[in-house]
């Protein structure tokens, strides 16, 4: 059975431009190879923003007088990605797929009493492998100020205050969708699956990395000096007693020391291997962070260039559309003039025939065309002249 999937991501203001261009399909090219541009016309909005996400955020915040301090590092918007697997949508069909996202949209409006007014955008993408919805909303909590007045406050940390916030979200979403007639399963939490992601920092703490490095520096791998039985002053002891001490006391201890030494070597090798792995991982992490930072800068530059050219493209498109509209208007006027000219000419010929008793107008037209070798119909005359020019060129 398929799963009810809802994932949340938090965004700062600086992130809104990029996700707006992706969600609303404002880019020309995408790094995601799964996007089929020929199917992008199938995408639709359950709520379409009036402006860009940044401007829309400012509009909503001002309109509803949202409280809360906003800093550069503050998360000001969240995005739910709502979906299931491709086979699920294929099975339920087009109409039920629409109902799935409409039901999910209603769930978000009601969850934590958010309110539809704080949904910034809800875009359904049908041009990727599996249908999914990008829903951007403002994490608003309904609370009271110091005077006890009811206020709406933009506070991402308070919206997701509980430690198991995402578990609550997953449970609520699953229950809501199932109660609305969708046959789905709830994904298993990590407590039941036993799966856990451990990052480099956590791994270093678990393995006590820093202390291990210090231990490796101070560890001694030399064997301790084992006294030789001959060096011990045992003049009073007999030879048999010497041999007994050697066999029963000194040699067993020597064997123990040898075994401990081997274990110590193995332990040293293993600890050295672990510290090397972590040091390599740290190096990789730094390189990766550097590449990601450079990539984000390049991505922002590309987005700025694309936005600039998009604006120019919009300007040019508007100018061409205005010109085309003007030409269409002029062309329609000329068509009316030509049609009216035909009408007047026909009436004029009929009038002449009646006025001077010439006969039928058709006969008069035929005589005119025969004597002048010209058609009274402009289109026929133009075609005749064009054929004559072509004939002259070929000769």
Image (cartoon, grey):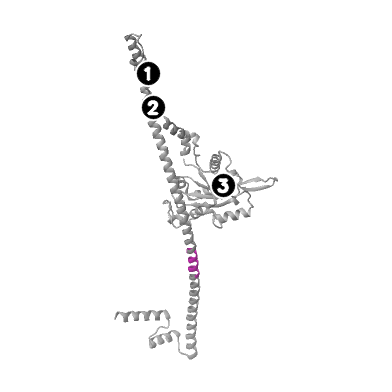
Where does residue 160 sit, x and y in percent of width and height? 57, 43
Q: Residues within 10 Å of mark 1 (few under 14, many from 20)?
A: some
| Residue at the spot of label 1 | 253
Where does residue 325 sit, x and y in percent of width and height? 50, 70
Identify the image quadrant of the C terminus: bottom left
* Foreground disc of the pair 1, 3: 1
Residue 41 showing in the rendered view: no
Q: Are marks 2 and 3 in contact (CB under 8 Å)?
A: no
Question: Mark 2 or mark 3, which has the lower sequence index?
Answer: 3
Whether 240 is among the magenta residues is no
Q: Which region of the structure is painted magenta?
A: 313-322
**Which of 134 and 330 lies nearest the eye of the viewer?**
134
Where does residue 332 sit, x and y in percent of width and height? 49, 74
Q: Who's the residue at 48% across and 58% down the image?
A: 304
Q: Residue furthest bottom?
A: 356
| Residue at the spot of label 3 | 108
**Which of 375 and 205 lies nearest the eye of the viewer?**
205
Which label number is shown at residue 310?
none
Q: Residue furthest left?
A: 395
| Residue at the spot of label 2 | 264
Residue 164 showing in the rendered view: yes
* Image-based side of 113 in relation to 45, left or right: right
Q: Secondary structure at mark 3?
A: helix
Q: Main secondary structure of the magenta part?
A: helix
């Amino acid at each position: 059975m398929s799963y009810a999937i809802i994932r949340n991501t938090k965004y700062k203001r600086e992130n809104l431009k990029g996700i707006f261009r992706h969600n609303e399909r404002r880019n020309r090219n995408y790094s995601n190879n799964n996007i089929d541009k020929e199917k992008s016309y199938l995408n639709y909005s359950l709520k379409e923003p009036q402006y860009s996400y940044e401007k829309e955020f400012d509009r909503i915040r001002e309109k509803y007088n949202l409280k809360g301090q906003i800093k550069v590092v503050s998360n000001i918007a969240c995005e739910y990605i709502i979906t299931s697997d491709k086979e699920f949508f294929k099975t339920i069909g087009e109409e039920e797929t629409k109902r799935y996202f409409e039901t999910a949209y209603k769930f978000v409006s009601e969850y934590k009493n958010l309110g539809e007014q704080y949904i910034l955008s809800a875009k359904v993408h049908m041009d990727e492998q599996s249908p999914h919805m990008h829903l951007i909303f403002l994490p608003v909590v309904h609370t009271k100020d110091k005077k006890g007045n009811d206020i709406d406050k933009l506070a991402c940390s308070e919206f997701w205050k509980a430690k198991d916030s995402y578990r609550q979200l997953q449970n609520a979403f699953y229950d809501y969708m199932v109660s609305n007639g969708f046959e789905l399963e709830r994904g298993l939490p990590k407590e039941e699956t036993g799966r856990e992601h451990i990052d480099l920092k956590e791994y270093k703490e678990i393995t006590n990395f820093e202390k291990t490095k210090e231990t490796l520096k101070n560890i001694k791998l030399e064997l301790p000096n084992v006294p030789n039985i001959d060096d011990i002053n045992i003049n009073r002891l007999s030879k048999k007693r010497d041999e007994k001490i050697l066999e029963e006391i000194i040699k067993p201890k020597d064997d123990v020391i040898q075994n401990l030494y081997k274990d110590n070597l193995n332990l040293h090798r293993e600890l050295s291997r672990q510290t090397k792995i972590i040091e390599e991982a740290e190096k990789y992490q730094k390189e990766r962070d550097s590449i990601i930072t450079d990539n984000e800068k390049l991505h922002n530059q590309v987005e700025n260039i694309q936005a600039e050219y998009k604006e120019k493209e919009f300007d040019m498109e508007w100018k061409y559309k205005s010109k085309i509209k003007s030409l269409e208007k002029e062309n329609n006027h000329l068509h009316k003039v030509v049609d009216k000219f035909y009408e007047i000419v026909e009436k004029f010929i009929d009038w002449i025939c009646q006025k001077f008793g010439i006969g039928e107008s058709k006969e008069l037209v035929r005589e005119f065309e025969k004597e002048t070798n010209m058609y009274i119909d402009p289109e026929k005359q133009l075609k005749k002249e064009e054929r004559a020019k072509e004939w002259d060129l070929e000769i």
